[in-house]
Every structure is written in structure tokens, then in C-alpha cells.
Image (tube, rainbow, N blue to C red):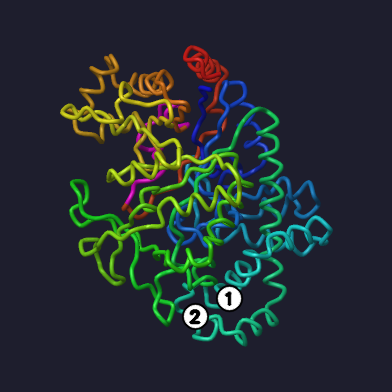
Amino acid sequence: MRESGILMHISSLPSPYGIGTMGEEAYKFVDFLKEAGQKNWQVLPLGPTSYGDSPYQSFSVFAGNPYFIDLDLLKEQGLLRQDEIDACDFGSDEERVDYEKLFHSRFDLLKKAFSRFKPDRAYQAFVADNAFWLEDYALFLTVKECYCHCSWLEWGEGIRLRRPCAVAMYRDLFAEQIAFQKFVQYLFFSQWSALKAYANQNGVRIIGDMPIYVALDSADVWANSGMFQLDQDNRPLRVAGCPPDGFSPTGQLWGNPLYNWEAIRQDGYGWWVRRVRAASKLYDVTRIDHFRGFESYYAIPFGEETAEHGEWLKGPGYALFETIERELGEISIIAEDLGFLTPEVHALLEQCGYPGMKVLQFAFNPWDDNDYLPHNFVPNCVAYTGTHDNDTTLGWTQSTPPEEVAYAAKYLHIFDRASYPWAFLRAVWGSVAQLAIAPMQDFLALGSEARMNTPSVLGGNWQWRMKRGAISPELTRSIRELTEIYRRA
């Protein structure tokens, strides 16, 4: 069945409180999707962000981002007062997120809410059901606060290595702070569950994003050191990245710790099964980032300043996904199969049967009849105009080599720059791909100022927010008409 949807992260929704939340504007966005004939809402990872504010570098792959907790909903519950909210500075730019101001304001409000909260059966059930990750995560953030938010690699040896006496001491001394972190997660998942239920009731599926790797400074690595390639002091031996290529002469050094796949296999892939199970509850469909890393991954010695001296090592292959399917049944997954692909990667994707991705912005090399050109699409794929790592389509016309822009104009019959976003949308919506997705920025025909992320560039990323009132009735009708023309409604 042909469908379509829109990529729009929670952080980008309008809000008077500095960042998009799971409140009124999120519900309005679901209403808009329904009216526009869209059956899918794709979001970026929902985890709590760390230094750099990237949703792909989270303190936990299981936890939710406290910034997305809606303050108005807490006010309705009697946990906050409007004057307390109004006293906080969330930033003055309605089109950009000011993460520093959020960090200094949001948690004080949540602590006020915690002081008024009375634990009930729903809260106790949440804590019990999520104990397998929540206990370690709440302790991790509590200890991190004790160490002025430093990485766990800089903590005292006892707690860094999770010696039982040190863990017990922190749990005893900081029980109230640990309880606060559990409360924050309870708020997040309560609000998210209600929002997701509303979307599903209105015929909208949530597509979520699962990064293959976890952040080094995370509860996941600290609490599960045996699953990663670490030395006896729990410091990385090798880290993740990409080798040098035509776009990056020294490669990309991501810095994420690499998995110890042999240890994970011996454990029956239990952590990965729990992770995918949690994602399948959080989302209706899960997009797995950097799928090629399951076939083979690039390993760079820890301490290297570039990615030039790494090597390719074998990943778990089909055995991991076979185990996941056996344990969880059929899970809806999209494989992010972009980048350097080998015949072995193609074979793994075919064996799994997951749809891969086609990104139209990658298509227009005039000398290459590539898989991203719409006439080469296959039905079992998800087609995008661009992703969170691309420029907006309008911005692409100025940040891309002129010969590629000119080829796109010939291919799509475009005569002026302003027409590129909707020409790209028509090409993707009209393709044979079973699912078509585009960022909200392309429907709004915004330029590079609305770009979500520029890979390998520090600062200025993940900040874009949609203006209140940007979605007009005319735009909604245009999207619905596009969707009905190509039988995706």
C-alpha cells in the first residue's frame, strides 16, 4: 500500500517554552497530518541529549528527553503554576532552540513539579516495568550531577568501575535525586504514550529513529561495559567512524564505543532484543541508522585525531536480526542503507527484507545512473527528498555543485529556483516507493537557515523550529492534493 509522511522532530514544533514539546502543538500537528492525508510522522531519536545537543548522542537509548515534557500539561495536573513557568527564560527566538537556557531553566521547574508529586500505582508500575534500564540511568545522571556533569570516565575509580560498595553508597546518599530522575522519565513516557495513542487513533503511525551506536558518555556504556570494546579501566580500545572518501579526506571520527559482538552473541543478543522491544513500544516503525555497520564496521584506535587509520571488521550479520524476529515476532523496520555499500551489505538487507532508503538529493550526478534516481527506485524502499543530515531542498540548490543542480532541473523539468522543493516532492511522491517522506522544511520551501544538521560541523545544529502559524489551510490542501494525485492518501 502506497503511503507518505512528514519528517518533523518534536523539538521543531512551535512552543512558548523554548523548544517543541508533547503538548498542544504536537496534537495540532497530528490533526494537520490527518487533514493533509499523511499516515506517517517521522521523528528523530527521543533520548536525552548531551554535549552538542545531538539526538544521536544520548545519555541513554531507553530514556526520554526531559525538554519534550510539556509544561502546560504539568500545570493542568497541579504540579506547576503559571507564574513559576513565566519566571523562566527559555530564549527569545521562536525559530531557534537555545539549549543553554533550557538547561538552566527546565530542570528547576521539573524539580518543583517533583516536590508536589504523589506517587501512585501508575508510577509504581512504570518504575517496575522499566527497572532493567531505569535504575542504572537514574543513578548515572545523579552521579553525573555530583561530578559537575563530567563524563563518567572522569569519575572516581569506585563508581566509574561500578564497584558494589560505591554503587550502594550513592544509592543510599542520593535516594531523593535518583527518585527525581525516575519521576522525570515517568512524565516523559506518560505524555508520549498519550500523544502516540492520539496519533494512532487518527490514522497516523509514528516512525522513530534508532542510532546503531550509543554515546560513550551514557548509562548504556557505564552499566554494560562488557558489551563494548573497552580496556580493564573501561576506556575504549577502538571507536566508530567512517574512512576517508571524496567528501572527507581524513574520514569521519564519530567517537562512539564499538560493540564487543562476540560477548553480545554469547549473551544471546539480549541487550539488543530489549532495545528493539522498547523501540517497538515507543514507535510504530523503527528506522535503524547506519545499517551497514551490522555487516561490517569501521574501527579506529582510540586516541586517533582522524579516521585515517581504521580497519573494517565483521559485524553480527543476519544472526542478530534472526534472533530479534524469533524473540519479538515481526517488527516494522526501515534500514538506513546510505553510504559505502558492498555486495555483502546488499545481501544482508535482502535477507532481512527491510526496505532501504532513497534520497533524491543524492541522485543528480550527471555522469552516474545511480539508485537514487526515481526511475531506478524499487517498491520496497522509503524515498526521501532529503534527511535531517541534508540541506533543505531549496538550500541544496545553492550548496550543491552547479552541474548537479542543472541536471536536476533537466530531469524534473524545473525552470526557476523557487520550484525545486515542490518538484522534488512530486518526484518522490510519484515514485514507485512504498513510502514517501519529506522534511517539513521542504513543504514550507525554506532555505538553508532551516537546515537541521550539518554533519561534522560543531555548533548551530538541531536548533530549527517551525514558526507558529506556518501551516496554512492552503498548504494543507496542497499536500493533500499531491498525496491524492499519486494515490498515497
- In the image, residue 449 lies in the stretch drawn in magenta: yes
The percent position of residue 278, horizontal first and vertical second, equals 61, 52
Identified by mark 1, the residue type is Val
Residue located at (53% from left, 22% from top)? 1
Vertical comparison of 76 with 364: above or below? below
C-beta proximity under 8 Å, tags 2 and 1:
yes
Q: Which residue is mark 1?
A: 143
The percent position of residue 245, horizontal first and vertical second, equals 20, 49
Vertical comparison of 270 with 146: above or below? above
For the C terminus, which image quadrant? top right
Q: Which residues make up the magenta segment?
A: 440-455
**Horizontal relation, residue 286 to residue 177: left or right:** left
Q: Which residue is mark 2?
A: 155
**Horizontal relation, residue 48 to residue 119: left or right:** left
**Horizontal relation, residue 254 to residue 10: left or right:** left
State the image quarter where residue 14 is shown: top right
